[in-house]
Image: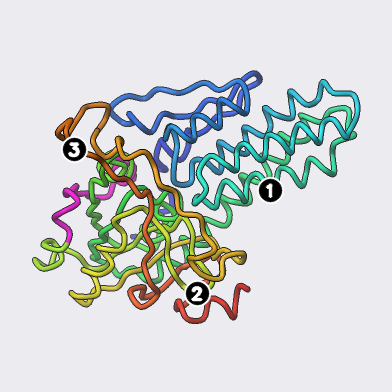
Amino acid sequence: MPLTDIAFPTIVRRGVLLESDRVRILDRRVFPLKEQFVDCRTHEEVAVAIEDMVTQSGGPFFAASAGMVLAARAAERKKSARERLDEMVSAAERLRRTRATNNGIRVAVSGMLEAAHKLAGEGDFAACLEAEMREIWNWRWARSRRLGEHAATLVDDGDTILTHCWAETSFIDTLAAALRQGKRLQVICTETRPYLQGSRLTAHSVAEMGIDVTVITDNMAAHAMDRGMVSRFMTAADRVTLSGHVINKVGTLQLAIAARHFKLPYIAMVQAPDSKAASPADVEMEERDGKESLMCLGMPTASPLARGWYPAFDVTPPDFVTAIATCDGVFGASVLRAHFS
């Protein structure tokens, strides 16, 4: 029997909260082992929280747009529209610099800045920007629901889906749509070192939806495919280029290679490809401090004599991508440019 009432996960419902004097960001570095928030009273504090991985994946979209509201509240004290806009441009530039590869930050900040230009002369400038933020959030959630409906058409009843890292609402809305269609599912999550987003965020969220979920370490995926435990591989994408390259959490490439070897489909999910990125050469790839690869949940996991290396993302070529699910439908990588450019 198809389900109509899907329990949406805590991290989706309570990931970023805008209050009258602060932005509260659910700390994904410790969730679900602890449910605690980082309070930010300025856009600078929001920027630091994004850089420090308090939130990631789709979370920075909501955090950055809420940070722009904090900036508007501070800018409202300025008398002239020009001074307000200068403050907002400065805040936008700071938030954009936090994580260069995460396209959601750019989309959120650009939308808020466009609204600021139109509303800078309003007496209730900050309230107007907060209303704009709510509209932007609703816009993104609606697009995610459409993406999920399209992606769910690629899921069969009885599937076991392997996923990597935390795919935010794209994966959750896909699972929700599949459940509403009466499909029975299981999910396997890679733990996703070094922050364990898969074993903590994805596994907990999928379990909250009532779906059976298994956690494996990052080096077990090919073996799980070989054992016949996986039906398909699905991830979100931090960026998809018009050339069909999928840029996502590092480790996605090796899983896509394994999936192709075992003749399993790899489906990437993104609301829309980046029309400004013709190829991976147009995307700034984030390299984080290598020391983060020597730690896990604040504990050392490597020899103090070793160096660490942490490229945050990798690039999966279109040849390894079976389909890309978007808000507009499902596409082969080779036809993205014609539809979205």
Q: Is residue 310 left or right of residue 75?
A: left
Q: Secondary structure at mark 1?
A: helix
Q: Are marks 2 and 1 in contact (CB under 8 Å)?
A: no
Does residue 278 lie above or below 18 as drawn? Answer: below
In the picture, residue 32 is in which quadrant? top left
Location of mark 2 (residue): 243
Task: Tell me residue 311's x, y (percent).
Answer: 35, 50
Taking depth in this image into account, of 266 and 100 the one nearest to the observer is 100
Location of mark 3 (residue): 306
How far is mark 3 from mark 1, CA to CA?
Answer: 41 Å
The kind of residue tagged 3 is: Ala
User: In percent of the image, x 67 and y 39: which residue is there?
Assistant: 92
Dot label at residue 292: none
Which of disc 1 and disc 2 is earlier in sequence? 1
| Residue lying farthest to the left in this orientation | 227
Location of mark 1 (residue): 110
How far is mark 3 from mark 2, CA to CA?
Answer: 37 Å
Q: Secondary structure at mark 3?
A: loop
The residue stretch that appears in magenta: 204-221
Q: Is residue 119 left or right of residue 209?
A: right
The kind of residue tagged 2 is: Ser
Q: Are marks 3 and 1 in contact (CB under 8 Å)?
A: no
Dot 3, crowdedness within 10 Å: few (<14), some or many (≥20)?
few
